[in-house]
Amino acid sequence: MRSLSRIAGEGWGGGAYTIDLHAEYRAAGIDEVLASLDSELLGLKPVKTRIREIAALLLVERVRTRLGLTAEPPTLHMSFTGNPGTGKTSVALRMADILHRLDFVRKGHLVSVTRDDLVGQYIGHTAPKTKEILKRAMGGVLFIDEAYYLSRPENERDYGQEAIEILLQVMENQREDFVVILAGYADRMEQFFAANPGFRSRIGHHVSFPDYDQDELIGIGEKMLERQNYRLSPSAREAFERYVAARRLQPHFANARSIRNALDRARLRQANRLVTDVEGGRVTEEQLVTIEAADILASRVFSGAA
Amino acid sequence: MRLTQGCFSFLPDLTDEQIRAQAQYCIDRGWAVNIEFTDDPHPRNTFWEMWGLPMFDVQDAEGVMMELRACRKSYGDRYIRMSGFDAGHGWESVRISFLVNRPEREPRFDLVRQEGEGRAQRYALRLRREAA
């Protein structure tokens, strides 16, 4: 650990020594990771901003460590809050990769768990279960989905609290070994943090995932279709836009997941249309790939049935 | 008597850093790391007691060290060894096995003689169990 006076000029031959952060940035490959994040996940502006900021922090940390300017490892445990289907799990997966590229976690694998994986059913069951999961997550990222289910205060025979305590202890003591990402709905996570202040203080980054807007949902739908070698005919695209606008207003809208379900149903209708309605039963590749307006307009969303 | 079983046993005791490096070496090659302990270090005793299952799904040596710390807490007064099992085709066997913990005072062995058929002598080793 160097004293600041050495840094000021004595040890390095007069304060003109500089480090090219941009070169470091390029060398670490952060650009391509962020670019792939941008291209694969639409929208999510606050998320991408935060990831960019974390990448910059980790880059500076790396340079400082190389120069012997030690500092406490930054707290990278995160909390992702947002409605269903807003990309929390997708981003968590990429987060593991990003952190690995920046050398913050050693292996960069993601261990995704829910309450059932951590909490036992009888006395003495919880601790080994939780420790097994933590063992597997070392060197990577532990993603806890629906984290608020861990604590069930109304049921006194619930062992969630034990799992929470073990988690809190390991999160604090082994910060350099792994990263925990909690995910869930915003209001329930807030209640969970209020009941467990230890968690809130250990989380370094609270990231909220906003709902997608109309254009983003359409874009996501098109990307999904493209990946599966489908395309929308022009009339189908227009029908799809109307569909999304109507579906968003209906209850239980799960953002990207609802879009995926809708597209799956459209594919189902397309397949049935091709099997029953096509002359002579012979189809071209063009027909196999295209989704027509009829496939989308058949949805209940348009018939007005809620 | 200082036991010389397994790899590195003629070297001074491995430090935690070195054990971690060895465990990571095994994990990097896809071997399952396993921790076993025993209080009977007879050279013919190959079946030591297992501390948990082989850690075939652990990606980082820190997980192994967590288990080792727990094992030392419970059985720090016994011999503990770590082994790496290669499940690959053609190998399907333990590739490396080394001691990671020894008791404070390592027990000694006595030579036991037994008379067999036609006054032939059979020799065996027995652990000298010191009075507690």
Image (tube, coloured by chain):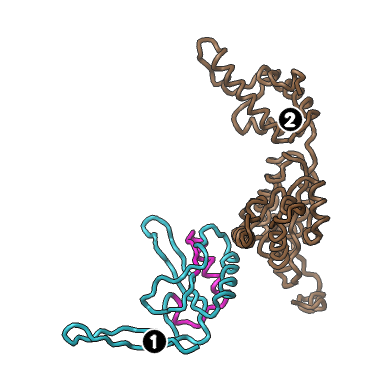
Chain colours: A brown, B cyan
| Residue B23 colored in magenta in the image | yes
Depicted A7 relative to depicted A28: above or below: below
Res. A263 in view: yes
Residue A181, position as x, y percentages in the image: 71, 54
Host chain of mark 1: B
Q: Residue A42's image quarter?
A: top right
| Residue A100 colored in magenta in the image | no
Mark 2 highlights which residue?
Answer: A218
Q: Amino acid at mark 1?
A: Phe
Pointer 1: residues within 10 angstroms few (<14), some, or many (20+)? some
Which span of residues is magenta-colored? B7-35
Asked if marks 2 and 1 touch (Cβ < 8 Å), the reply is no
Residue A261, position as x, y percentages in the image: 66, 31
Host chain of mark 2: A
- Residue at left 26%, top 86%? B114
Q: Secondary structure at mark 1?
A: strand
Residue A17, position as x, y percentages in the image: 77, 69
Residue A16, position as x, y percentages in the image: 80, 70
Q: Secondary structure at mark 2?
A: helix
Pointer 2: residues within 10 angstroms few (<14), some, or many (20+)? many
Depicted A239 relative to depicted A166: above or below: above
